[in-house]
Image (cartoon, rainbow, N blue to C red):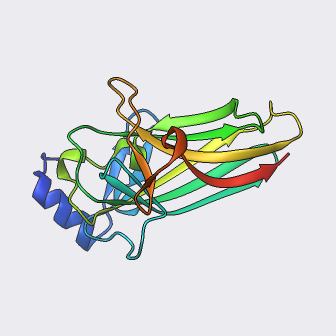
Amino acid sequence: GPEIDGEALRMAATESAVTVFDLGRGGFIDLSALWQPGGASDGRALATFGGALGLMAATAETSGDALAVQLRWRVLAPPPFLPAIFVHVYDATGALMAQSDGPPAAGFAPVALWRPGDGLRDERSLDLSALPPGEYTVAVGVYKPADGARLAAEVNGARLADDVFAVATLER
């Protein structure tokens, strides 16, 4: 169809379901489920990243060798670049054992259209089959893809070590 301008897209995502076609996967994506203009959850963020994103909710569930992580974000101040979100799994010594990196909302929510108060949903699936038995920490962070620099992670104004927020621990 014809190209839609940004404000019309924001309005459409606010008022009704909007789907887009993902050429890479060959299927439709529900954009309105991933990006909620003006519809972020209220309350205090679990953590903030670079003053740009607030992590409003996070869950991590295992099923067999799969780890499903769901993240809910609130845009605090639109960044001048599309940030990358990482979900890392660390062992008890702090070694990185599994990871998933990519833009929030699977990259379908155009960062140029983000406004403070917008909600973003991010879902990640990680394969844990190569992990030996032990205790692991699931952590989240945000970085600039151009140079890998992590955005400052804070909880209640205190900077977090390595700019990561621990979401959960799991036992294998």
Residue beneath the point at 73% across and 53% down:
169
Where is residue 138 drawn, in percent x and y? 65, 47
Residue 85, image quadrant:
top left
Quadrant showing the C terminus: top right
Q: Is residue 140 left or right of residue 7?
A: right
Residue beneath the point at 35% across and 23% down:
147
Residue beneath the point at 13% across and 51% down:
4
Where is residue 89 drawn, in percent x and y? 67, 40
Image: 152 above or below 167: above
* Outermost residue toward the front in this view: 158
Q: Nearer the viewer, residue 45 or 34?
A: 45
* Outermost residue toward the right in this view: 133
Q: Nearer the viewer, residue 81 or 51?
A: 51
Where is residue 146 drawn, in percent x and y? 32, 24
Where is residue 71 drawn, in percent x and y? 51, 57
* Outermost residue toward the bottom in this view: 42
Residue beneath the point at 24% across and 73% down:
15
